């Protein structure tokens, strides 16, 4: 089978002053975050069976938790290490991964992310001999994935999951476009790995497309991956957009790919551990459940397609990336996802042509950024808030799973939940300001619908928490400080005995 690297989005040459991240692979990024006090090494023996996940969960019940590198997995003979909470709820580690200032506010990170995510740099090919992932290459019966630590995260999990912090490559049979997704993968045996995809995801559509042609679907999976590729694999992109192009733009240089051993898909040259394989129609085994990002076990045990592994590539003493799925802030889908999804929503609304939108935020505590999106706007005409709500609800970046879409005025910071709650409580009249969309795109992992056959469909609440447009002139004035008084107090803040810097205010009293 012939594949192009991707049906690429239009490449954009990096500007001369575009930042390039200082790291090139997971190991260099680990060194970077360690130098910034964002890594904790755990050298004592830890059992991959529930104990590792228990440590991660207990350590991450607060938002400011370091990445955790487990260096001594009990019983492991492969020399592997496991990195957990790679990003989690840390805005600082997100910033370090993409070359931003860790001291930026969340709103500022969203704005900067829009810039770097729209700078596309195509991937480049490197020779097999120069790819670190090819330290060790095995094929056929020489492969034994059971030799590597695959955690069992939760007591009720259906098995050990080698694939949680992974990226999975599939290709469209029609265009050759390569998709980079993140799909959970349960280990069945030395060369057998279960692969679950939610309905509608590109990996599932690619897989089914090959089956319709009577052919197996080629798959490449990396189980030890750098943070940028991992972050992008969880985002929703258009069917013709290349995650590799976006990743290159975010890093300031093209992602290095190399040729595989048995298939036509490329493999990430700097990954820690990669498999090549095929998924054939009808080849299924029982999979799940797994404790998921919702904080519940996701899907009952059911037959799911299996990857038949043909080749294994790995670095010496590989670092596997494990992503704990749990309720916030312990979920690996945390701050980074909220920032990137918010940037994508703003881009979508801008492309659609909606005026007046000034901010958006997918709150990470709402099922790891999936459940709630808040959009702020400057109202310009009758029906403006309703238009923004409807379009935000169904734009590509927010259509999947999101249940609550809230519109607020531009004097409300969408990243500040306290301000959003204030707007909901003082500007929203529930009987008039809530609309419902039905039969929307959802996930089989949503526990709010108990009947499994209904779960691919969802619903969305559109909540207008803006001042009523027809009464803008009569609406009560908000209590705000006078600018000159704020600036005078801010200048005296340290003198007044406060250790932290003064709060940043942007809205002030107008005479």
Image (cartoon, rainbow, N blue to C red):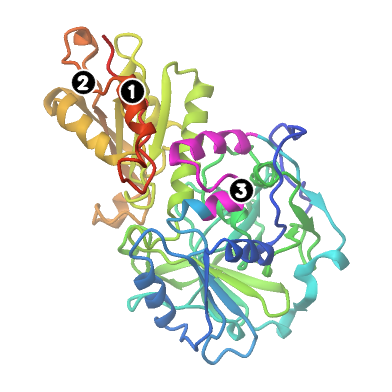
Q: Secondary structure at mark 2?
A: loop
Q: Nearer the viewer, mark 1 or mark 3?
A: 1
Tell whether label 3 touches label 1 (CB within 8 Å): no
Query: Mark 1 or 3 closer to N-term?
Result: 3
**137 or 217, which is in the foreground?**
137
The reply, left or right, for residue 426 in relation to residue 155 is left
List the residue tagged with mark 2: 478
Query: Mark 1 or 2 closer to N-term?
Result: 2
Which residues are drawn in magenta?
Answer: 93-118
User: Can residue 259 be seen?
Assistant: yes
List the residue tagged with mark 3: 98
**Mark 1 and mark 2: Cα distance apart in space:** 10 Å
Does residue 111 show up magenta in the picture? yes
Disc 3 residue crowd, few under 14, some 14–19, many 20+, Cα 10 Å: many
Query: For residue 116, what is the image quadrant?
Result: top right
The reply, left or right, for residue 267 in relation to residue 343 is right
Name which residue lies at 36% across and 75% down. Answer: 154
**450 or 81, which is in the foreground?**
81
Question: Which part of the image, by quadrant, shows the N terminus?
Answer: bottom right
List the residue tagged with mark 1: 507
Tell whether label 2 touches label 1 (CB within 8 Å): yes
Query: For residue 431, what is the image quadrant?
Result: top left
Q: Secondary structure at mark 1?
A: loop
Q: Main secondary structure of the magenta part?
A: helix
């Amino acid at each position: 089978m012939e594949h192009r690297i991707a049906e690429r989005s239009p490449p954009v040459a990096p500007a001369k002053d575009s930042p390039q991240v200082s790291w090139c692979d997971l190991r260099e990024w680990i060194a970077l975050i360690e130098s910034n006090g964002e890594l904790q090494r755990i050298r004592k023996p830890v059992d991959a069976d529930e104990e590792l996940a228990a440590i991660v969960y207990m350590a991450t019940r607060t938002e400011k938790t370091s990445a955790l590198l487990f260096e001594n997995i009990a019983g492991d003979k492969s020399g592997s290490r496991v990195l957990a909470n790679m990003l989690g709820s840390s805005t600082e580690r997100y910033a370090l991964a993409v070359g931003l200032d860790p001291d930026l506010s969340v709103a500022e990170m969203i704005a900067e992310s829009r810039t770097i995510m729209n700078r596309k740099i195509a991937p480049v090919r490197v020779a097999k001999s120069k790819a670190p992932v090819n330290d060790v290459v095995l094929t056929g019966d020489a492969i034994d994935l059971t030799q590597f630590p695959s955690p069992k995260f939760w007591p009720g999990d259906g098995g050990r999951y080698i694939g949680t912090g992974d990226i999975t490559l599939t290709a469209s049979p029609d265009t050759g476009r390569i998709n980079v997704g993140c799909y959970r993968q349960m280990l069945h045996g030395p060369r057998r790995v279960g692969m679950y995809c939610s309905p509608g995801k590109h990996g599932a559509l690619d897989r089914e497309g090959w089956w319709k042609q009577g052919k197996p679907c080629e798959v490449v999976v990396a189980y030890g991956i750098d943070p940028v590729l991992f972050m992008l694999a969880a985002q929703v992109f258009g069917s013709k957009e290349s995650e590799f192009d976006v990743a290159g733009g975010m890093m300031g240089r093209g992602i290095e790919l190399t040729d595989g051993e048995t298939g036509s898909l490329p493999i990430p040259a700097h990954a820690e551990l990669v498999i090549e394989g095929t998924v054939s129609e009808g080849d299924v085994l029982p999979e799940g459940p797994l404790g998921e990002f919702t904080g519940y076990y996701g899907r009952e045990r059911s037959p799911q397609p299996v990857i038949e592994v043909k080749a294994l590539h790995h670095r010496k003493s590989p670092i596997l990336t494990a992503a704990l799925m749990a309720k916030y802030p312990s979920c690996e889908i945390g701050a980074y996802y909220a920032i990137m999804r918010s940037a994508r929503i703003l881009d979508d609304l801008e492309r659609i042509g909606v005026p007046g939108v000034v901010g958006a935020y997918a709150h990470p505590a709402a099922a790891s950024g999936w459940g709630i999106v808040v959009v702020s706007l400057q109202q310009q005409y009758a029906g403006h808030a309703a238009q923004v709500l409807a379009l935000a609800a169904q734009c590509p970046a927010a259509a999947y799973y999101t249940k609550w879409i809230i519109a607020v005025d531009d004097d409300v910071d969408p990243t500040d939940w306290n301000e959003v709650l204030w707007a909901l409580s003082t500007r929203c009249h529930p009987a008039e300001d809530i609309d419902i969309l039905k039969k929307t795109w959802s996930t089989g992992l949503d526990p709010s619908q108990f009947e499994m056959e209904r779960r691919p469909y969802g619903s969305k609440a559109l909540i207008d928490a803006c001042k009523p447009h027809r009464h803008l002139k009569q609406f009560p004035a908000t209590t705000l400080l006078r600018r000159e008084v704020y600036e005078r107090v801010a200048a005296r803040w340290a003198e007044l005995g406060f250790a932290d810097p003064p709060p940043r205010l942007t809205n002030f009293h107008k005479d």
